[in-house]
């Protein structure tokens, strides 16, 4: 009811006034958004979709952070020229534990069974 | 190299999604039968189509892998299937919400469309344990490709079987004698399909880029650890 009242008020006002309301005015002037019983299901469906995307991006961000850390380790290792890359031993162990982990191969397939991303990928 | 065109693709995807959702809520008319609930259609159906097409694309990449033996195609196939499984989760979630709003139940077991999609989804859910149960890298890729091809062939067969089945409650929107969507709804649907398709492509490229970067780091580590032709490690030379 409040939405309908807002719509009626806005209908009688000039466009300039509608702009001044901003997003609230736009929502109120849009009869295609009846946020009643049906609205909560529609909102739920779209929120689930957006949540999945956000979760995926968050997981990918974590993976990218790990890659960045690995890259920093390798760069430091290359610059210092000291034996034993930090974390290398641990990774070697995890590589052995990870099923499907071979010894050689093109770089893209190396990442198909890394630690942490097995099965999940994202 | 996988990251090439990722930026314009991401921008195009964002623009397409914003345009699609704007059309859904501010342009497409309310459905005469379902009313506002029908807005879920513009999300649910493109997600389902994209997921199913993605499974088939994964099968096509798997064929390329078996034909060429290039593990790049195996990675493409894996990422395509992986992304389609994620989209499949979204299809099941949005479908359940729509079912609850429309039919009063979260799930209807005697509806072929729902159950067949669940079967396809669960079949692809077994792809991960199947793949990673095999230790040898080459065998893993080969077997996973065979799985992807067989499962990919099952998807259109399954779709046709469902179309031929007598539906109980799930509507048939496209290509039916009762008529399809009106123009404005069809335009909105097509823009949504384009947006979701673009999202799938972008996320596949994003994942491939991340995997490639991760693989490059590992390759670099191996190269740094490997002894140089003179018998000395290239990164850990003996200091005299």
Image (cartoon, rainbow, N blue to C red):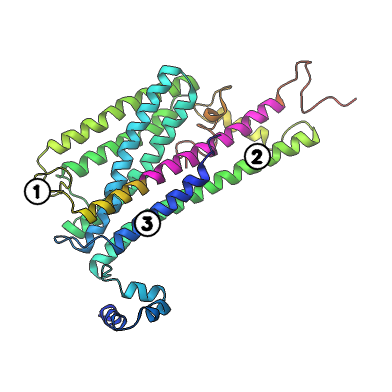
Within 10 Å of disc 1 (Cα), the crowding (few <14, some 14-19, many 20+) is few
Helix, strand or loop for the magenta stretch, by majority: helix
Which stretch did the figure color magenta? Answer: B197-224
Looking at the image, residue B168 sits to the left or right of residue A1; the answer is left
Q: Is residue B217 magenta?
A: yes
Labels 1 and 3 positioned on one and the same chain: yes
Give the quadrant of the N terminus of chain A. bottom left
Q: Which residue is drawn at 39% across and 25% down?
A: B62
Reply above or below: A78 against B136: below
Q: Specify the quadrant of the image occupied by residue B134.
A: top left
What residue would you read off at disc 2?
A70
Quote the CA–CA distance across marks 1 and 3. Answer: 29 Å
Q: Position of residue B196 (x, y in %)?
A: 36, 47
For residue B186, side relative to residue A111 (left or right): left
Residue B153 shown in magenta: no
B24 up-or-down from B196: above or below: below
Residue position for label 3: B19
Give the SS element for disc 3.
Answer: helix
Q: Distance between the residues labelled 2 and 3?
A: 39 Å
Q: Residue B162: image x %, image y %?
A: 17, 37
**Nearer the viewer's eye, disc 2 or disc 3?**
3
Q: How far apart are marks 2 and 1 (CA)?
A: 59 Å
């Amino acid at each position: 009811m409040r939405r309908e009242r807002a719509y009626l008020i806005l209908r009688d006002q000039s466009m300039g006034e509608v702009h001044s309301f901003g997003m609230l005015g736009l929502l109120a002037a849009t009869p295609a958004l009846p946020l009643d019983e049906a609205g909560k299901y529609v909102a739920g469906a779209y929120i689930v979709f957006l949540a999945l995307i956000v979760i995926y991006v968050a997981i990918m961000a974590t993976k990218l952070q790990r890659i960045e850390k690995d890259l920093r380790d390798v760069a430091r290792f290359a610059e210092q020229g000291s034996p034993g890359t930090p974390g290398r031993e641990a990774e070697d162990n995890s590589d052995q534990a990870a099923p499907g982990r071979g010894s050689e191969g093109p770089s893209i397939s190396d990442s198909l069974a890394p630690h942490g991303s097995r099965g999940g990928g994202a | 190299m996988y990251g090439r065109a990722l930026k314009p693709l991401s921008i195009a995807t964002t623009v397409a999604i914003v345009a699609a959702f704007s059309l859904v809520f501010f342009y497409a008319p309310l459905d005469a039968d379902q009313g506002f609930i029908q807005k879920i259609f513009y999300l649910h159906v493109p997600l389902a189509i994209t997921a199913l097409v993605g499974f088939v694309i994964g099968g096509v990449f798997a064929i390329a892998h078996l034909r060429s033996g290039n593990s790049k195609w195996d990675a493409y196939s894996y990422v395509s299937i992986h992304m389609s499984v994620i989209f499949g989760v979204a299809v099941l979630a949005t479908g359940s919400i729509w079912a609850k709003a429309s039919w009063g139940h979260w799930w209807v077991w005697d509806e072929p469309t729902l159950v067949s999609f669940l079967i396809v989804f669960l079949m692809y859910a077994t792809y991960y344990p199947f793949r990673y149960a095999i230790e040898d890298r080459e065998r893993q890729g080969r077997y996973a490709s065979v799985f992807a091809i067989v499962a990919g062939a099952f998807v259109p067969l399954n779709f046709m079987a469902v179309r031929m089945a007598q539906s109980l409650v799930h509507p048939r929107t496209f290509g039916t004698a009762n008529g399809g969507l009106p123009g404005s709804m069809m335009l909105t649907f097509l823009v949504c399909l384009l947006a979701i398709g673009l999202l799938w492509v972008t996320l596949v490229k994003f994942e491939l880029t991340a995997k490639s970067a991760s693989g490059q780091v590992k390759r670099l580590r191996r190269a740094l650890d490997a002894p140089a032709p003179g018998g000395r490690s290239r990164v850990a030379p003996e200091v005299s």
